[in-house]
Image: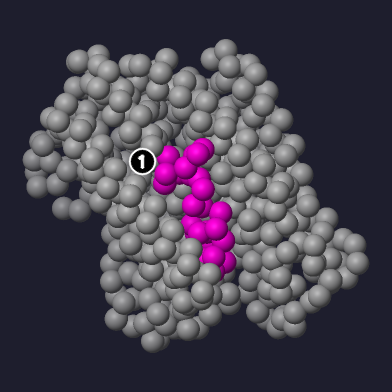
Amino acid sequence: MINFLLIPILIPFFAGMVLMFIRKNISLQRIISLLALLCASIVAFVLMIDVKNNGIQTITFGNWPAPYGITMVADGVSTILVFTTLVLAFFIVWYGFESIGKAREQFFYYPGMMMIITGVAGAFTTGDIFNLFVFFEVLLMSSYLLIVLGGEKAQLRESIKYILVNVISSALFVIAVAYLYSVVGTLSMADIAVKIAQINQPGIVTTIAVLFLMVFGLKAAIFPLYFWLPSSYGAAPIPVLALFGALLTKVGIYAITRTYTLFFVHDTSYTHELLLILSVLTIAAGCIGALATYNAKQIIIYNIVIAVGVILFGVAQMNETALQGAMFYLVHDMMIKAALFMLVGIIIAVTGTANVRKMGGLMKHYPGLGWFYLIAAFGLAGIPPLSGFVGKLLIVQGGFQAGNIWSSLFLLASSLIVLLSVMRIFLYAFWGEQGALEPIDRRKYNHLFYPTAILVVISIAYGVGSEWVTPFMENAANGLSDPSVYIDAVLKGGK
């Protein structure tokens, strides 16, 4: 019998397989893609509530007892992230109808989107460290297709860097897993936690922990390993950029969070102090990059780097308050980055340029776009009561509790840089003298604007209605701060 927790992964997977055989029929591809993501989102929402009310669910393939089989785990963290992933994918695919172009739609765009969602959802759900590598490869292979789709010169140039970095990262991932297996003799993440606790994390395991941080840090784009991200992401088409910006670095963040809260927890004075330093440097590097460019896409891309630092700063504190804040902020950032890239895509569509200094006066012609962009910008900066506020507040509170006063104050100060960077787009694009405008059909504009506006409204609801979200975040943070909850559910059998 198929366990309920697999359905949000299987629906996009089988939809992607079907879509490969009807790539010339654009209308049917669109319908199947949206229906698959809608159905998977509903199932993921039901699963998220079930896990919140009844505890962690697991399934181990082949009827092997844990830890000998490959285990999939639906806990508070994974169900929240899978549900968020599927909802965002729905709006990004809808947005792409009018922005990706028919030539790309006919060349395996929709199968690529479905397979990348399969890889992301699988990575969030797996309880096996090698299976995490497998799902990483699924999403990466799909991303290789999507980043070159259209064959523009900039895409092909940047895709070489993107592929090379990820091939090296994947090779290091296999090496790190091999080293870890040679020490603990297991691949089940719950069993790894037990084995490392039994040997009290000797120096070799701490070295492996740093190697994993480097592997996942390349994928998450932490300092100094973020060098590939701005140009590689910037070359992708806007819907692909929105998907990458919302999801791909978050898988790296999740992998660091899971390993550094589940089993690399016995030498925190070294591993988590290193993570803390790197997170602060990541925030600083992102702030410098966001202020140094006048390209609208690049400004938001560098804000991805800043958010990576903020979330991992919360993880590094290793207390429940900061971990709850990290979960709040992680979901917020996934939503708001997707919305901002979609908004920037509309701005570029109506102005014909990504250079903010060549824009101007859009408020006169597109006031709705201007006000929705302003709300999203305020949300990104954490202006209360919008979605970024609660997460950042809890992370800073957790930093104070851990005694990291100055770094917490630096994180707060970085919010001003974030606000300044995104407000530059607003001031240049929507005010001042009228810049160049591209002729754009009102129907096309509306088809771009509606999914974007709905996503911004959802982000507002996430912030204003945070008291309804808090129980889910508390459940997730409790599982991260108390690894025994996860370990017992897996090794003793979940629901």
Q: Is residue 205 left or right of residue 250?
A: left
Q: Position of residue 259 (x, y in %)?
A: 34, 31
Circle 1: is it few (<14), some (14-19), or many (20+) Cα within 10 Å?
A: many
Residue that label 1 marks: 215
Q: How is the image coloured?
A: one colour
Residue 347 visible in the shown view: yes
Q: Quadrant of the C terminus?
A: top left
Q: Is residue 356 left or right of residue 91?
A: right
Report the residue at 69% width, 34% height from top: 414
Q: Position of residue 146 (x, y in %)?
A: 43, 68
Report the residue at 47% width, 42% height from top: 225
Above or below for 369 versus 399: below
Start-end of magenta stretch:
217-244
Picture quadrant of residue 475: top left
Q: Is residue 4 magenta?
A: no
Tag 1: amino acid: Val
Q: Is residue 242 magenta?
A: yes
Above or below for 375 versus 381: below
- Provide the major secondary structure of the magenta segment: helix
Picture quadrant of residue 281: top right
Q: Along the line of sight, which residue is nearer the eye, 59 or 323?
A: 323
Q: Along the line of sight, which residue is nearer the eye, 99 or 428?
A: 428
Above or below for 391 versus 118: above
SS label for mark 1: helix
Residue 9 visible in the shown view: no
